[in-house]
Amino acid sequence: MHVLVVGSGAREHALLLALRRDPEVDALTVAPGNAGTAALADQYELDVTSGEAVIALARRIGADLVVIGPEVPLVLGVADAVRAAGIACFGPTRDAARIEGSKSFAKDVMTAAGVRTAGSEIVDNPARLDAALDRFGPAGGEPAWVVKDDGLAAGKGVVVTADRDAARAHAASLLEAGHPVLLESFLDGPEVSLFCVVDGETVVPLLPAQDFKRVGDGDSGPNTGGMGAYTPLPWLPDEMTSRIVDEVVKPVAAELVNRGCPFSGLLYAGLAITSSGPAVVEFNCRFGDPETQAVLALLESPLGQLLRATATGELAGQPPLQWRDGAAVTVVVAAENYPGRPRVGDVIHGAEPGSEHGGSVLHAGTARRDDGAVVSSGGRVLSVVGVGADLAAARDAAYRRIESIRLPGSHFRTDIGLAAAEGRISL
Ligand code: GLY
């Protein structure tokens, strides 16, 4: 099987590594990729938002399966175009991808499916903003305001704050840019990312993970696309994963079938485990980043066969997934000033993808300069993945590997998975 992976992040790097372990995958191409993925697959320039360009590349290389990593092409309908061209594609249709592309659509689906989620209100009229803010956050008796961009914002459209002025300023800037704003109730409780491979009403969960969205240790500073993750979650009983599948993911998958837009691909449920049970924070229509880098590090089942079976409507016939024992931790190394405008163009030393001390380096915002040097080219530059017998050992592997990386001005969180490793998370 020749697989074309579309995307350029550490998530795509992780997908390539896992696909390479599948004995039925005999050729790998990535587009546009990055400096690290070039060592694993043939690499081509690509406008990932153009269905025509993806089809042309898939035909040129003879791809049997196209795997679309990021949300933007999915929301734009690139998977529809690839399938219409007769090429198997892992990724939902444009209509199904609205579960991520439009928060109001996702809320509507969850309400119809009877799935618990935060109470919310869409504001598209600046004149109504102040009254709406008064119904949420501390003004409404909650610890904080949750203000989100209704559309895609790479994780950075969300502000959670107890400061009314900050909440108002974020909402006003979104409205000024013509983006409707979603105000949400604050969901209390530890967060879980549960990725499920979904084909219509067939739902296969992967290992639950937790990601770290704030830029700084102790969950300080602004939200980012994700600064780290770990899996599995020692504090989450297996029954809770089954409950999330039965009470959240299956009803949503069934509701999408009812609406004539069945989901095929990776449905990512972001949840808070509240005192009344799991409640949805968000859905995404693709593998999450950086959780994928940790989750796929523990996957033993052949990923190419799993994704192909999903793309061809045969997921229900797949054997149960097999996982390696132990734990995995991803720590993101970010460029100076990220999540603001990142400093780019710096030479990176010590980022060879090969693993050392049980830790390996996946590339995201990296590029190869004409003289051969690897340079930073984005906000989240590298994902360092540690694997170990338990969370403490996996953390140790990741942080030891980071010590040999040199990137001027870069920063990373030092507490990824720490509270869980120290037994400080409980339900
Ligand atoms: N981990 C957050 C995301 O992938 O959106």
Image (cartoon, rainbow, N blue to C red):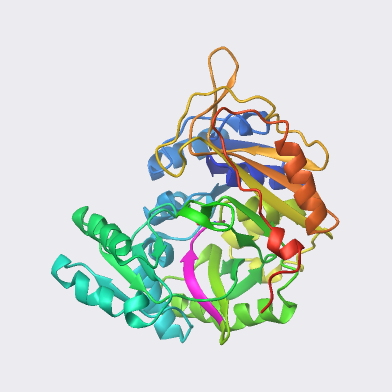
- At x 21%, y 70%, the residue is 129
Q: Residue furthest left?
A: 127
Expressed as whole percent of the image width and height from the top left, the position of residue 171 reads 27, 61
Q: Which residue is nearer to you in this view: 53 or 290?
A: 290
- At x 61%, y 74%, the residue is 202
Expressed as whole percent of the image width and height from the top left, the position of residue 207 reads 70, 65
Dominant SS in magenta: strand
- At x 62%, y 73%, the residue is 203
Task: Inspect this view and state whether residue 104 appears.
Answer: no
60 versus 251 height, above or below:
above
Name the image quarter holding the N terminus.
top right
Q: Which residue is nearer to you in this view: 178 or 298?
A: 178
Q: Quadrant of residue 196?
A: bottom right
Q: Which region of the structure is painted magenta?
A: 278-287
19 versus 201 height, above or below:
above
Expressed as whole percent of the image width and height from the top left, the position of residue 43 reads 57, 30
Task: Inspect this view and state whether residue 177 appears.
Answer: yes
360 versus 184 height, above or below:
above
As drawn, is 19 to the left or to the right of 104? Answer: right
The image shows a total of numbered marks equal to 0
Task: Check if residue 381 falls in the magenta segment.
Answer: no
- At x 40%, y 84%, the residue is 112
As drawn, is 37 to the left or to the right of 224? Answer: right
